[in-house]
Image (cartoon, rainbow, N blue to C red):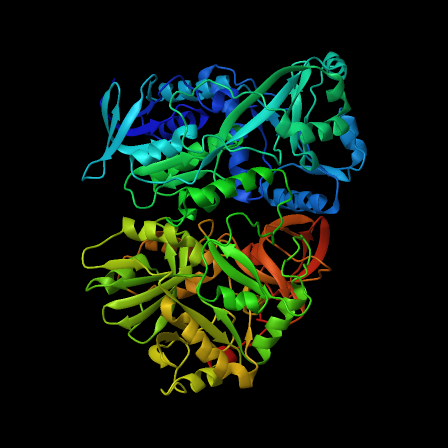
Amino acid sequence: MQTSTRVCVIGGGVVGASVLYHLTKLGWSDVMLVERSELTSGSTWHAAGGFHTLNGDTNMAALQGYTIRLYKELEEITGMSCGLHHVGGVTLADNRDRFDMLLAERAKHRFMGLETEIIGPEEIARIAPVTDVTGVIGGLYDPLDGHLDPSGTTHAYARAARLGGATIETHCMVRETNQRPDGTWDVVTDKGTVHAEHLVNAGGLWAREVAAMAGIYLPLHPMEHQYLVTEPVPLIEEMMRDGVEHPHVMDPAGESYLRQEGRGLCIGFYEQRCRPWAVGGTPWSFGQDLLDNDFDKIEDSIAFAYRRFPDLERAGIKNVIHGPFTFAPDGNPLVGPVPGLRNYWSACGVMAGFSQGGGVGLTLAQWMIEGEPERDVFAMDVARFGDWIGPGYTLPKVIENYRHRFSVSYPNEELPAARPHHTTPMYDIFTGMGAVWGHQYGLEVANYFATGDEPRYETPSFRRSDAFAATAREVAAVRGGVGINEVQNFGKYRVTGPGARDWLDRIMAGRVPQQGRLALTPMLSPKGRLIGDFTVSCLGPETFQLTASYGAQAYHMRWFDSHAQDGVRVENISDRVTGFQIAGPQARDVLAECTLEEIGDMAFLDVRRLTVGPVSCIVQRVSYTGDLGFEIYCDAMAQRTLWNTLWQAGQPFAITPFGMRAMMSLRLDRFFGAWLLEFGPDYTAAETGLDRFIAWTKSSDFIGRTAAEAERETGPRRRLAAFEVDAEDADVQGYEPIWHDGAVVGFCTSGGYSHHARKSVAQGFVPPELIAEGLAVEIEILGQMRSARLITAPLLDPDGARMRG
């Protein structure tokens, strides 16, 4: 066995084999894979082998589309068969909400180039005749759906990797992974030690155990999963005589997926009475094994399936496949560089390996070789979870996700498992005031405040929800007087040291402010893509505070750590520093009541240390509401005292608490963007308008400067614009196609209802040449074409006098 390599991939399932192949495809040939047993051992060998493109995240759907198209390429490269069956598939909807979800997905597919279509019950019965369409409203048909041979496909990946120079060592058990001082790794196996520059954990069922060897925790858990294969079904045999293979049928109401298997049928379930597996750890002795049959837990699912697919009840059961596979808490893979470790990469939690494995392999190979993936993959970035997560959170969330695998995914849904997890000192106070809670990155965040007999629960919907009236109240309070909102859900960082200013000048594309001032700045990748939008506040000659998205803490700290510099200290203080923002035309009056210090001369974008009541605070003259406002930061231990001070001072001004639903409405009035909606790694500063914050004249060679300057010369291929939409009871959520002259010319990034302007508003990307006041377009919302027009003047304070005054 070779004893050194550039990359050592641990795990010989479909994901590990895909990573190995893509590394060679992108040019690294000195790579190897070690597998403790045979290739496909673990979850791969007993997988049902289905694949599909449907995914609520458009980038995940695109990667699934890449995976499916890759299989023919693998067959051509290797001369091996993947056992492909492109039979198409239909997802059923038996109620309005499920149909709304399919309409929303179909709309996204239009600008992605996926040829899906909405079909009615009659068409479903024609193409999928085993289906009883009683009660079915319609379905989403995808011609790319199909299934394959899991073993043949994995071995095709492996052969393609070997043809590219890779080495595969089977029956090679990893015992330890030890990092050297230079960041490289010693992978200790029962056949000897391999020295690797990079280590990839593709351990599948054993990913937790492999991670523990490096002293880290990956939020994964295996779940038992069962599917049945029937004896021959006469209807299937009849179709085969006509040369037709039955398409896949996904039935969310029955929590099942069905496909043809030989002359019979294969059906699997995501049952409510599900069971986690190997809670104490995956046994190393487990391999190409199955679990004992368990019909009790799928009894209800089978009964429903017999009604939906009557032929099943008349067919005998030929095989029962019952085996484990891993989930992350949200069901998406864990991919990318693991925060806190150098040269350690994750390729785990890929529960839909034959839909996602190719995209995961491509993404990781691009990340390792080119420095960043070609698209925004935050939905599967291992850094979307921080060090706050542990087994006690992971297990209930994985169970919840399994149960919701085929459920409707609503844009405003707040799932309850493992909550509340993290709360601020305001949790009980806000709960007593009627807070309806959401969560972000493990933190409870007030979405809005219910009053009177209003329910303390927001009913999930694709349309305007029962939070609409409460949100309108809160917006009116901010715009007409003063509102108060927590700033806990900002990521906050302290940068100190003699080299802090120079470091920030290199890390951030914008200008670094002078003491007592703050600045807005994009943070760019080397390719000029947005990896952060920050507020940078200068508190002293060598002290700065940064604020950004709370949910991107591990993502941003990983970037800061990878660019560490002597003389600079970067601390994540997100949960050590908290506070409130007050916003609205009377915000200054409230603050003036709370401090003995003069604030009348505090200009827009000023930052000061003030004593508010008895609390020492950092106060910033800025607000995401687009109104006159202040962000007031304090030590977390003093938050309740600060609240009492502000709340009492605000009573004569009818101060009103407001939540994130109001915040997201308020920001639309000024066309402010949001992280992972308008701003993210799919986009550049020029595309989003953040290039206006780039300090083009500063002398530092900031990261991404070359790419940003090149785009400045050529101009972006698309630009962000705002639209007023003729909507009814549903507003833009994101990724709806924008139509002009009968063609899709762009897509929406986000939208909602401006309660201040009483208009439905959307933001989205269109070609620069189309951007002009009053441009008439149509936006497809839940299958309906809604008239819209491009607007360039903000709906509030168009000249900025109110915000800056």
Looking at the rendered structure, the number of numbered marks drawn on it comes to 0
Closest to the observer: 200 or 160? 200
Closest to the observer: 724 or 351? 351
Q: Position of residue 545 (x, y in %)?
A: 33, 66
Q: Position of residue 499 (x, y in %)?
A: 21, 62
x 44%, y 37%: residue: 220
Res 525 seen here:
yes
In-image side of 770 versus 309 (left or right) = left
Closest to the observer: 599 or 22? 599
Quadrant including the N terminus: top left
In-image side of 377 versus 49 (left or right) = left
x 41%, y 33%: residue: 280
Q: Position of residue 480 (x, y in %)?
A: 59, 80
Res 694 seen here:
no
In-image side of 750 versus 185 (left or right) = right
The answer to which quarter of the image holds residue 772 is bottom right
Establish if 168 lies above or below 414: above
Establish if 306 lies above or below 54: above
Q: Position of residue 347 (x, y in %)?
A: 40, 34
